[in-house]
Amino acid sequence: MTVTYVFDFYNLYIPKGKKYENKEFGIKIIPLKFAEKFEKNRTTFSKPYYRAGGWKTAKCFIKTRTEDEAKKLASWIEFLYSFAQNRSVFFLGWYKYKSGKKYSSFHSKFVEQRENRFSELIHGVHTRGAFYTRDISLFFDIALKTLSSSKDIKLNEILTTIHALIISHSSLVRELKFLICWSALEKLANQHYSVYKSKNKLFSKDELKKLKADLEKTLEKSLKNDKRLNLVKKSITRNFLYEHNTVEKMKLYFDSLDLGFDKTKLNKMLNKLIGVRGSLVHNLNSTLLIKEPQLLFYLQMIMENVIFRIVGIDKDTQKRFLLHQYNRGNEL
């Protein structure tokens, strides 16, 4: 037996006269009258909607067998709309639906502190020629399908990555924003490498054993009575010396996703970004990021495209989205 649960959503915009409906997952989202006022005034400095905060703009009806399943789907909607509309989209309360009656409850949660004034990432979807619609159901249909078919580990990867990008747009200091984004991407690249790396060894087991022995002999001659000898001998036994480094792993991962960036420019940008990461992690030095603050923006832009791919949006489908074209520069 299925039950319909109603979730009050904040800062979620669906155009007047439209609704989002996904029959496969039993989801229907209907805008409230206030939604148009919120959307019209949220970029006006003198209006309260400009700042961080929540305004009830939509009713979400989810028909499921259990309350936990409904809450899970509502949580996915939070992540996906927050990503697509570039602000904190969230629900606080829900109740069982019954004609003429409401059973209210309240669920408190942490909501990222983000202002509502920024341009959404996905403004609309092209229909034909220069025409487009503000209805972005296409994105949600594909993304919900991907989330529902993902195993727990993959699902966690996707949601963690989206959350990392959302956090990077909050009120944290720039250095933390950068490291949160980089860590999320590095984790994805490492996971991809562990699964898809070549099974062919650079050296056979016997060759590797002989190579290490020869290196040790050479080192003993070069570093005789040197205190660094044992440290270096220990280092050459570590497996990671025969693995790709972090940047190479990220290049392999990005190649597999076909992000749509110029490959030469992307690789050049990655070298810059790894330099910032190294100075922050190893030296607590943010000079590089202060000198080129746009590097955080480029990292976020790469992350946006990664998220499109991992939620099932290929390059051709992404071209159908009308993305707000702020000044992207020419480095990607």
Image: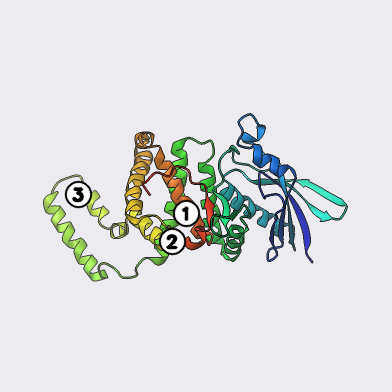
Front position among marks 3 and 1: 1
Q: Earlier in the sequence, mark 2 or mark 1?
A: 2
Point 65% across, 40% down: residue:
40
| Mark 2 element type | helix
Q: Mark 3 Cα within 10 Å, few/some/many (few <14, many 20+)?
A: some
Marks 2 & 1, CB-CB < 8 Å contact: yes
Q: Earlier in the sequence, mark 3 or mark 1?
A: 3
Percent x, y for residue 118?
A: 56, 40
Residue furthest toward the front? 129
| Mark 1 element type | helix
Q: Earlier in the sequence, mark 3 or mark 2?
A: 3
Percent x, y for residue 190?
A: 41, 57
* Residue position for label 1: 305
Point 58% across, 58% down: residue:
139
Is residue 51 visible from the viewing direction of this image? no
| Mark 3 element type | helix
Residue 115: image quadrant is top right
CA separation, marks 3 and 2? 43 Å
CA separation, marks 3 and 1? 46 Å
CA separation, marks 2 and 1? 9 Å
Is residue 199 visible from the viewing direction of this image? yes
Q: Mark 2 Cα within 10 Å, few/some/many (few <14, many 20+)?
A: some
Residue 68 vs residue 104: left or right?
A: left
- Inspect the image, locate mark 3, and give the three-letter code of the amino acid beneath it: Leu
Percent x, y for residue 6?
A: 76, 53
- Inspect the image, locate mark 1, and give the three-letter code of the amino acid beneath it: Asn
Residue furthest toward the left? 221
Percent x, y for residue 28?
A: 72, 57
In this view, the residue in front, 122 or 2, is 122
Front position among marks 3 and 2: 2
- Inspect the image, locate mark 2, and give the three-letter code of the amino acid beneath it: Leu
- The label number, if any, that marks residue 229 in the structure image: 3
